[in-house]
Amino acid sequence: MINGVVAFIHAVIDWFYPPFRKIMPMQTFRYAACGGGNTVLDILLFYISYNFILDKQMVHTPFMTVSPHIAAFLMSFIITFPVGFFLSRYVVFEGSTVRKREQLPKYMIVVAGAILLNYFFLKIFVETFHMYATLAKICTTFFVVAFSYFSQKYFTFKVS
């Protein structure tokens, strides 16, 4: 079943590739397509969580109170983490020479860095610069995408 899903995703992405052939390699295009799709999903889930599920309200737990923009980030992350790993492992970096059992822990390390960047930039943009939370999430995404691409390419899914 995974092979069929991957083949379908490759077919769809690769159909759009020819106009970009001269400006980027296939792997970069696939990363942009998969990462772009997962990013759109992330921002959409963030927006829905922040505005409708959390209603822009603080989240009170027995241990701490979490700001709505951080809670919305965590809610979207629960879905986009496994989607992102699947797309990276099977669609973008399928030629990786890193052993499969090492890929998930390495991916988790990179994602932990992305979480810290998300947290840091969301805090700064929302609480210091007083940006709207969804706009802050979009701005944050630019930094996180650059970090993630190079980390995934040269660390998690590198090719010897």
Image (cartoon, helix red, strand yellow):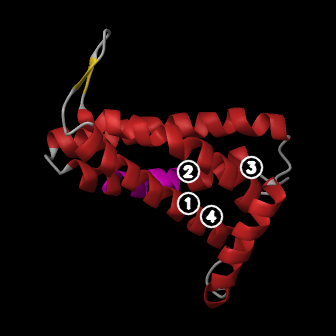
Query: Disc 3, disc 2: CB below 8 Å?
Result: no
**Rendered position, 39 above or below 54:** below
Circle 1 Cα neighbour tier, 10 Å, few/some/many (<14 / 14–19 / ≥20): many
Residue 46 place in picture, x, y as percent: 35, 47
Residue drawn at x 53%, y 46% is 80
Spatial separation of the CA atoms under disc 1 and disc 3: 15 Å
The magenta-colored residue range is 139-148
Q: Quadrant of residue 71?
A: top left
Spatial separation of the CA atoms under disc 1 and disc 2: 9 Å
Spatial separation of the CA atoms under disc 3 and disc 4: 12 Å
Q: Nearer the viewer, mark 1 or mark 2?
A: 1
Looking at the figure, which quarter contains the N terminus?
A: bottom right
Return the residue at label 2: 148
Residue 82 appears anywhere in the view: yes
Return the residue at label 4: 31
| Mark number, residue 4 | none
Q: Main secondary structure of the magenta part?
A: helix
Front one among 120 and 55: 55
- 16 part of magenta stretch: no
Query: Of callouts 2 and 4, which one flags the residue occurring earlier in the amino acid sequence?
Result: 4
Query: Disc 2, disc 4: CB below 8 Å?
Result: no
Circle 2 Cα neighbour tier, 10 Å, few/some/many (<14 / 14–19 / ≥20): some
Q: Could you tell whether 135 is left or right of 92 in the image?
A: left
Tag 4: amino acid: Tyr
Query: Of callouts 3 and 2, which one flags the residue occurring earlier in the amino acid sequence?
Result: 2
Q: Could you tell whether 16 is left or right of 116 in the image?
A: right
Q: Nearer the viewer, mark 3 or mark 4?
A: 4
Return the residue at label 1: 35
Q: Could you tell whether 27 is left or right of 20 in the image?
A: right
